[in-house]
Image (cartoon, rainbow, N blue to C red):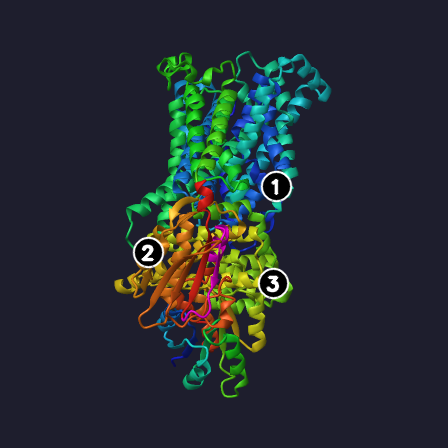
């Protein structure tokens, strides 16, 4: 062991300086817009290799030396995911881009209605799960240092080793802060970091291959020799445990998706979806090469090194045993690369989560009410990111110092895998199941997290360290079926398999159960649809027909919205990106998509889409689009705290709008005229709501009286919208025959009493004349529905009766077939030409606004009376407007 | 120079909103709610731009637009047509009858403003 500590430190410093330089140059290129190689799919693939941490670099050999081929599961999982679950990853990446997702916590929070609680929960899980992992990296670097400096240096060496970890942590903090928080790009991409990571990926691969080649050809004398050695070694005798293999493979696959750092490189840093295609073969190849020489190195290490040598360090100690200092140095740098790249990306991912989901919400709520200017917030975000990075690395360092090392590397890695896999049910459910709710996600995550902590994390500190020994042997308070590693009395399982099965099983169960039992809020439903149907939505966005549009028209439109300078800059940049001079890029579908996103920032996504749709000639605006506008308006109002109540109201309305649409679609009553009527009736109140919401948003300094007036208008229009939707839903239910009647024996006079009371409570000059004697009839009918019909007729009279002293006469007569109830007023009546259409939908006569309804009332009355077995008709020639409701006399039958 | 817009629309809340938005930006806003007399209102007020709703009481916005374009004295006034029906047919009809712009309700305030600025020749502001 002749390499001096100082030389090693010097090598590290030179290497780190190289990384800084590479990252710096990459950032410069990215800023200049010359991405070139940086956008290569290979860089993307290489950046995925942060999956291979020091655990993989050093630990896999140790793993193989202890447990034979089981280490393969760690590579098998991600390989299966990236090859077999290609569609899932693509969906994840697409959602990441369209929703501007910044982390896995953001994804979960955003999917479940932008829930801040879920964001916090996943962040917490990620921090708890990742801290030991970061500690592990620090430990591996320190351990590898110790191999070179040796125990010979005694106390002095140990002291400097503790310091080594501190220096490494500090250096990594600096690097991460410098390159991880350079700018607050909306896309959260870090070209410098990714390029440096890609370089490190190459270094660690080359290092491991070099050691492997040396071992096979330099020590064992070629493939034949190494084969003989493997046959002779104890590794060949290891049996595979099926349950453990399957579990570990599944866990590794889940980790590949759920680990915060993996999510960061796979989804957040992805600049082009097509890169996934390359990665789907190149990354498995990378993993294959990384694993190729693991067994040979382990076998040779077991053979040539003294009994008790740490197999986790074979990658270093085997070359050193053969006095190959140069090779050992390369291996050391490989391990160093593995550790540092993991720590850097994990710190970026975690700091984004901690900052966005914990620090910023607290800061914002602490400053509630004060003006938050954008520049102001920006600085705070940067500061909080930087502090979070320091805190994350500080935690890792603390954990390292306190745990004191010594734990086998693979164990910590697996524990973290199980912990982060808890996100999986909420993640997969969120992407494929619209019924998944925030309650479900919260229940699943909490339960899974708790079971994981109890059955795996706490016991991992050793018996008696975090959990009393009795909890493991007898269960808490002596409850046997709650023993931490034998839940529900199922003992004898491997602890990792046990914890994984129970935590994930209960997690998934709680997730599905609570989802089924709870009802999603409007924003959740919207986000659910956006996530689950991401390809359908963006297919629309991609569906622009580029040929029809002139770039100049687009520029003119964009200038009007964004302002001249910004629009020109945007177009110029796009043109330059296509290698063109001037301000007019080719109108590609990519460009249109980008433009839509930019415009969405100013006018909202749905409007931006509609505007581009109009200009590119893809015209028709559907009810669905209207719903998106409604949701957008609701969200806009959500940010204005004076309007919270209104926004809730509008959110509810948007939900009803969606239900109405579902019903209408089912009902195939989509005759064009009807739809266009509905569209008109819905859009008119929406227009006022939207316009005034924008006014309230844009003019914060408005006088209180105006503000109150305008929110009053929003309120009224929202109620109008709600009424209309109620009617529509009611009507569609009736027409569809889905209505359940609640029949009972009631007296007609009671029903009339109720109706008159309800209709007249709205202030009114209408006088109602009734004759008591005729009304003493018992009916077997649905009293609520019947009252609804009467209320409608009375309030119609109230609204439309033109007499100076309006009077409505209600008279009841009995005939052979049944009972007739006549409603006759003293107004002008309905002209003969209109009498045939009044029962049609939207057949409102005269001035539209005076009615206050959408013209569905009589249509609903007709449907109800039909369901009740009767009919409603207009009675001409009665002096005023007259309606007759005929009901069957089913009393006799009921009495029998 | 203050530009004048005539808003032909019958929904009072929408009138109020549009009036607010435009007045804030320095426009002079006149309104008219009856379809039957809308053309007279145009002739009387001679606005720089017209915002015309498609569905008006007594007379449809499309009919008004057709007559407007047929009237030599008024034909040059730019028209922004608004509709709440959101049908492709409406849009095509408006274009055929000579509307300069066409917009579906609900609109973004910024969009209406930008469009009117453009029609009045105020350029990008």
Q: Nearer the viewer, residue A46 or B58?
A: B58
Residue range corresponding to the magenta coloring: A860-879
Q: Nearer the viewer, mark 1 or mark 2?
A: 2
Say which chain tag 2 marks. A
Marks 1/3: CA–CA distance: 29 Å
Return the x and y of residue A888 as percentages of the image width and height: 47, 51
Q: Residue furthest right?
A: A224
Residue marked by disc 2: A772
Instruction: Locate residue A453: give its quadrant.
Output: top left
Vertical placement of residue A564 versus A337, above or below = below
Q: Residue furthest left?
A: A704
Quarter of the image that includes the C terminus of chain A: top left
Circle 3 SS class: loop
Indicate which disc residue A587 carries: 3
Q: Tell me which residue sits at (57%, 31%) in the image.
A: A253
Return the x and y of residue A168 as percentages of the image width and height: 43, 33
Asked whether disc 1 touches disc 3, contact meaning CB atoms under 8 Å apart, the reply is no
Q: Nearer the viewer, mark 3 or mark 2?
A: 2
């Amino acid at each position: 062991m002749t390499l001096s500590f100082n030389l090693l430190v010097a090598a590290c410093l030179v290497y780190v300086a190289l990384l800084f330089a590479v990252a710096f140059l990459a950032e410069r290129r990215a800023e200049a817009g010359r991405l070139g190689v940086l956008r290569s799919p290979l860089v993307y693939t290489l950046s995925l290799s942060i999956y291979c941490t020091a655990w993989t670099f050093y630990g896999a050999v140790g793993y193989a030396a202890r447990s034979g081929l089981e280490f393969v599961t760690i590579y098998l999982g991600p390989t299966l995911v990236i090859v077999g679950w290609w569609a899932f990853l693509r969906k994840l990446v697409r959602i990441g881009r369209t929703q501007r997702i910044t982390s896995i916590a953001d994804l979960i929070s955003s999917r479940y209605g932008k829930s801040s609680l879920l964001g916090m929960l996943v962040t917490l899980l990620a921090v708890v799960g990742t801290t030991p992992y970061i500690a592990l990296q620090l430990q591996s670097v320190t351990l590898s240092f110790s191999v070179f400096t040796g125990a010979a240096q005694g106390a002095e060496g140990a002291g400097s080793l503790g310091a080594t970890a501190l220096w490494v942590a500090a250096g990594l903090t600096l690097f991460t802060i410098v390159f991880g928080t350079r700018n607050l790009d909306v896309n959260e991409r870090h070209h410098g970091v990714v390029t440096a990571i890609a370089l490190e990926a190459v270094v660690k691969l080359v290092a491991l291959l070099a050691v492997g080649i040396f071992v096979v050809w330099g020590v064992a004398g070629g493939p034949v020799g190494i084969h003989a050695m493997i046959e002779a070694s104890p590794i060949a005798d290891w049996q595979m445990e099926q349950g453990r293999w399957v579990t570990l493979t599944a866990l590794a696959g889940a980790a590949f998706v759920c680990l915060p750092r993996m999510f960061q490189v796979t989804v957040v840093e992805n600049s082009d979806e097509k890169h996934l295609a390359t990665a789907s073969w190149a990354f498995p190849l990378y993993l294959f090469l990384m694993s190729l020489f693991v067994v040979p190195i382990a076998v040779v290490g077991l053979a040539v090194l003294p009994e008790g040598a740490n197999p986790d360090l074979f990658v270093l100690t085997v070359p050193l045993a053969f006095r190959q200092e140069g090779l050992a140095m390369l291996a050391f740098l490989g391990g160093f690369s593995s550790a540092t790249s993991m720590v850097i990306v994990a710190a970026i991912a975690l700091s984004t989560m901690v900052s966005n989901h914990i620090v910023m919400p607290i800061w914002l709520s602490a400053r509630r009410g004060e003006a938050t200017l954008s520049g102001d917030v920006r600085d705070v975000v940067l500061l909080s990111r930087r502090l979070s990075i320091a805190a994350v690395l500080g935690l890792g360092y603390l954990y390292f110092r306190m745990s004191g090392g010594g734990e086998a590397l693979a164990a910590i890695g697996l524990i973290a895998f199980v912990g982060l896999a808890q996100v999986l049910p909420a993640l997969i459910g969120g992407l494929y199941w619209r019924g998944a709710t925030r309650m479900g996600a919260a229940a699943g995550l909490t339960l899974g997290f708790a079971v994981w902590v109890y059955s795996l994390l706490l016991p991992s500190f050793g018996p008696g360290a975090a959990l009393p020994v009795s909890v493991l042997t007898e269960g808490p308070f002596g409850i046997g079926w709650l023993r931490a590693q034998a839940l529900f009395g199922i003992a004898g399982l491997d602890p990792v398999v046990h914890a994984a099965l129970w935590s994930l099983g209960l997690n998934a169960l709680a997730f599905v159960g609570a989802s089924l039992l709870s009802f999603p809020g409007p924003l959740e439903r919207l986000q659910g649809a956006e996530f689950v149907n991401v390809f359908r939505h963006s297919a629309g966005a991609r569906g622009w027909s580029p040929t029809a549009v002139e770039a100049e028209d687009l520029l003119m439109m964009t200038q009007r919205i964004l302002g001249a300078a910004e629009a020109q800059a945007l177009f110029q940049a796009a043109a330059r990106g296509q290698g063109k001079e001037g301000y007019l890029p080719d109108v590609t579908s990519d460009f249109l998509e980008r433009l839509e996103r930019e415009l969405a920032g100013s006018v909202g996504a749905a409007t931006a889409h509609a505007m581009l749709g109009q200009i590119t000639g893809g015209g028709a605006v559907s009810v669905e689009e209207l719903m998106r506008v409604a949701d957008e308006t609701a969200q806009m109002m959500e940010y204005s705290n004076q309007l919270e109540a209104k926004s809730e109201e509008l959110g509810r309305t948007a939900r009803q709008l969606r239900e109405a649409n579902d019903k209408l679609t089912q009902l195939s009553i989509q005759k064009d005229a009807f739809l266009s009527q509905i569209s008109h009736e819905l859009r008119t109140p929406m227009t006022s709501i939207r316009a005034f919401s924008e006014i309230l948003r844009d003019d914060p300094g408005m006088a209180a009286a105006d503000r109150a007036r305008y929110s009053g208008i929003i309120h009224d229009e929202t109620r109008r919208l709600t009424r209309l939707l109620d009617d529509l839903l009611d009507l569609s239910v009736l027409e569809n025959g889905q209505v359940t009647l609640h029949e009972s024996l009631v007296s007609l006079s009671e029903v009339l009493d109720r109706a008159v009371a309800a209709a007249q409570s709205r202030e009114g000059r209408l006088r109602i004349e009734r004759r008591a004697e005729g009304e003493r009839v018992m009916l077997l009918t649905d009293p609520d529905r019947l009252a609804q019909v009467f209320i409608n007729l009375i309030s119609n009279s109230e609204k439309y009766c033109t007499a100076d002293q309006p009077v409505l006469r209600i008279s009841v007569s009995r005939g052979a077939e049944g009972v007739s109830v006549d409603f006759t007023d003293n107004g002008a009546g309905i002209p003969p030409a209109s009498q045939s259409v009044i029962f049609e939908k939207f057949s409102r006569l005269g001035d539209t606004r005076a009615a206050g309804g959408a013209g569905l009332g009589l249509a609903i009355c007709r449907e109800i009376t039909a369901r009740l077995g009767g009919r409603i008709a207009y009675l001409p020639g009665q002096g005023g407007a007259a309606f007759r409701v005929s009901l069957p006399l089913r009393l006799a039958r009921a009495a029998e | 120079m203050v530009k004048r817009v005539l808003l032909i629309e019958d929904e009072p809340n929408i009138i109020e909103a549009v009036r607010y938005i435009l007045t804030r930006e320095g426009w002079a806003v006149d309104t008219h709610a009856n379809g039957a007399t809308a053309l007279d209102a145009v002739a009387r007020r001679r606005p720089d731009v017209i915002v015309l709703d498609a569905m008006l009481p007594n007379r449809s916005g499309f009919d008004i637009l057709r007559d407007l374009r047929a009237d030599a004295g008024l034909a040059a006034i730019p028209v922004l047509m608004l509709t709440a029906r959101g049908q492709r047919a409406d849009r095509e009809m408006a274009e055929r009858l000579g509307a300069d712009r066409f917009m579906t309700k609900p609109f973004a305030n910024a969009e209406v403003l930008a469009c009117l600025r453009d029609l009045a020749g105020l350029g990008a502001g």
